Image (cartoon, rainbow, N blue to C red):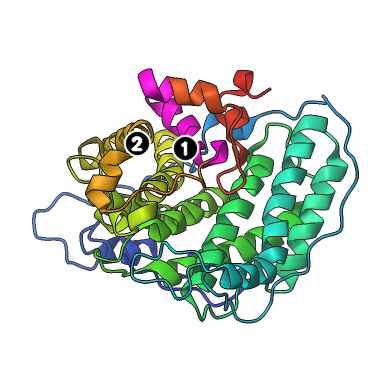
Amino acid sequence: MKLNLPTPRQPLLAVPVSALLLAAGCASNPGQPVQSGSAAPQPVTTPARLKAPAGFYAVARADDEFDGCPDASTPHTGPLSFPSKYEGSDAARDDLNEEAARRYNSQVEPIRDLERGINNLVEDYLETADIAAVDCALTWMLDWARADAMTGTATTHTGKSMRKWALSSIASAYLRLKFSASEPLHPYPDQAAEIEDWLGELAYLVVDDWSNVPQRKFNNHEYWAAWSVMSVAVVLNDRRLFDWSVDQYDRAANQVTDEGYLNNELRRETRALFYHNYSLPPLAMMAAFGDANGLDLEARGDHALTRLASRVLAGLDEPAMFRNKAGARQKLGDFKPSKFSWLEPYCSIESCTGAFARRLAEYRPLDNYRVGGNVTDLFNPRQSS
């Protein structure tokens, strides 16, 4: 599905919804004449507002004190031109280039600081109920919005990747402010509108960055792009963005083999298991958001998400199955609890027993700033302490 991009800072509803649906093959041509004898057109029903899972509506609780507002990171303006950590590697892209990784980390540090900083400030507010934390978070985001940060041309694949990763972090944190029953954004209508305009612009840029990727190249990057766009779709109540994300989810579900593998991630050879697992957080979050909006995404592709999740957990217990499938011994050193943040959204929509329940109990509380921060607090607050 290809979306027409609005020009910067123009209303996002410039593209008719009917045109988008036609492009996706989701609607009949509204321009067709009504045939003689046809029933009269029915009134158009306005769709319900897009929702987030229940945890995003949590009330702030005064359990702690806010430590004060840290200095915001410097907005990244200009082109998004970052090196890959795997620069110089072969087609498997599994050999870390330490010098390139140092350059990458140095160049993206301000963006990473924003991602982590906004998530920390939002969680500070939810734990303290101190509006000063909200004021600080909005000030950070406004600095970046007013600088048109991250809207420049993405000249490298890593540049495109950083835009959608950052968007997923910022938008999922912002969702917790927008939907909190404490209404922390109520005193800030103008600031919220400006930030949401910027998030919308970034979302449409991400759509442009990651649309029309052939299935042979479609992999975890597209899954993360779809999640970042879905989170903004719910912020803005933008059905076009939401439908694009669902379409991307369906493409991902169709890639999961009967055995639960992703062929495009098997190509990562020594990191095949790692990237199978890395594919799960955005897919599980989209499934949870789909569930909140009456869509059973987990069932798509004959329960592709469950097949993939089951294969990953089996592979953790027996890495040899991935070694045999990918043709290389698996590197397991990068696994840490935050990499399993997908368990919380997945287990919120599916009954988790066996290895799922065991891993979830072992790793809680789970935190991943690219899917909403403390996901245990979002999906199972009684287990978050």
Residue beneath the point at 16% across and 49% down: 39
Determine the secondary structure under disc 2: helix
Expressed as whole percent of the image width and height from the top left, the position of residue 245 reads: 39, 54
The majority secondary structure of the magenta stretch comes to helix
Mark 1, Cα crowd under 10 Å, few <14 / some 14-19 / many 20+, is: many
Residue 362 percent across, percent down from the top left? 53, 23
- Say whether residue 225 is magenta: no
Secondary element under disc 1, as helix, strand or loop, is loop
The residue sitting at 40% across, 34% down in the picture is 291
Q: Is residue 31 above or below residue 121?
A: below
Q: What residue type is labelled 1?
A: Trp
- In front of the other: 59 or 87: 87
Q: Residues within 10 Å of mark 2 (few under 14, many from 20)?
A: many
Q: Which of marks 1 and 2 is nearer the N terminus?
A: 2
The answer to which quarter of the image holds residue 305 is top left
Quarter where residue 144 is shown? bottom right
Tell me where the magenta segment starts and ends, as one range.
336-357
Q: Which residue is drawn at 39% across and 60% down?
A: 222
Q: Eyeballing the image, is 315 above or below 385?
A: below
- Residue 265 placement (x, y as % from top left): 32, 55
The reply to whether the C-beta atoms of the residues labelled 1 and 2 are less than 8 Å apart is yes
Tell me, for residue 342, which label it has, or none: 1
Residue 267 seen in the current view: yes
Is 118 on the left-hand or right-hand side of 101? right
Q: Does the magenta stretch include residue 340?
A: yes
**Depicted 68 relative to depicted 163: above or below:** above
Q: In which quarter of the image is the N terminus?
A: bottom left
Would residue 238 be visible to someone looking at this image? no
Residue sitting nearer the eye, 332 or 119: 332
Three-letter residue code for mark 2: Ala
Image side of residue 80 versus residue 118, left or right: left
Identify the residue position indicated by label 2 in the image. 309
